[in-house]
Image (tube, helix red, strand yellow):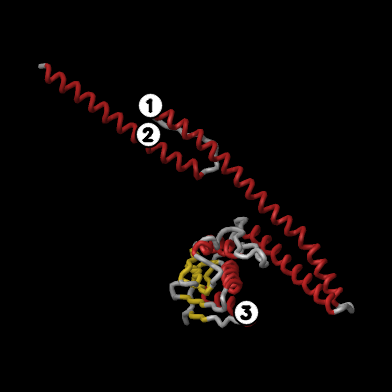
Amino acid sequence: MLPWILCGVLSAVVIMLVIKLVLIRKSINEICKELSDLISMDTNRRLTVSSSDKYIRRLAAELSAELQEFKKAERRYKDGDRELKEAITNISHDLRTPLTAASGYIELLREEEMSGDAKRYTGVVKERITALNELVEELFRYSVITSKAELKFEETDVRAVLQDCLVGFYGTFKSAGIEPVIIIPEKSVIRETDATALKRVFDNIIGNAVKYSDGDLSVTMTEDGEITFSNKSAALSPVLVARLFDRFFTLDTARASTGLGLSIAKHLTEQMNGKITAAYSDGSVYITVIL
């Protein structure tokens, strides 16, 4: 008789433990789902669970407290990021007027009679003002582009946009002594994308390639919409190439560059649901855009 009683008690305990385990699993699933929802929402709502188990409720309370701290940090980050972009935009606007005025006065000054040295000095000043103006414009474009502006998606011939960009750089290639090797398909490559943003991506990549090229440039495009820009660059390395898309990263601070060109290119490419990567092999850098 006693063995049967023990078996009954053990069976009851096992059943209770199984029920407890099922309820705990259900509560954990509830917490996971609600936590995922709350993270993606802009809300201060706390986690709620149907379980009456004190440990589960304690876990939910602890997670709610951590979630509240996360939301506060997220809001601080967004506020700081917005303030930084607004500051960049305002500073860019404020600098435009004096730079334009200075450039105009330098042009007037160069029309006056002056010595050879004076002409050379004013020429240097003019170049520096132009370079500074380009940096201000680049900062302004970055603040505008990263402000979540809506892109206009429409059927775009990616091949045609790439060709137009390359033609636009003809003078730059010639002055830099670069004869680009261009391999593109004969047929159009159509994608749903923003033509203006796509042109900006290609312009920034080509401009960066010309700036750091050792005298060559290769552009290859496949019918699948994969475009690879490559050039030899002894100044780069795998470590430096891994940072090419970082904001404000520039190889040479002495050059007229904010290091925003490729960061903007990456941002726009991802906004267009594309992918952009950089690699370094055998002394050459390869930047690939997939649309």
Q: Which residue is mark 1?
A: 53
Determine the secondary structure under disc 1.
Answer: loop
Any part of residue 227 in sight: no
Any part of residue 35 in sight: yes
Q: Which residue is mark 3?
A: 176
Q: Residue at x 59, y 43 (%)?
A: 75
Q: Residue at x 54, y 77 (%)?
A: 217
Residue furthest left in the image: 1
When the figure is inspected, residue 133 is found, relative to residue 181, above or below; the finding is: above
Determine the secondary structure under disc 3.
Answer: helix
Relative image position of residue 233 (x, y in whole percent): 54, 72
Q: Quadrant of residue 4?
A: top left
The span from disc 3 to disc 2 (Cα, nearest Å) is 66 Å
Q: What amino acid type is highlighted by mark number 2?
A: Ser
The span from disc 1 to disc 2 (Cα, nearest Å) is 9 Å
Determine the secondary structure under disc 2.
Answer: helix
Q: Within 10 Å of the Cα at label 1, are there few (<14), some (14-19), or many (20+) other Cα atoms?
A: few
Residue 207 numbered mark, or none: none
Q: What amino acid type is highlighted by mark number 3?
A: Ala
When the figure is inspected, residue 79 is found, relative to residue 108, above or below; the finding is: above
Q: Quadrant of the N terminus?
A: top left
The span from disc 3 to disc 1 (Cα, nearest Å) is 73 Å
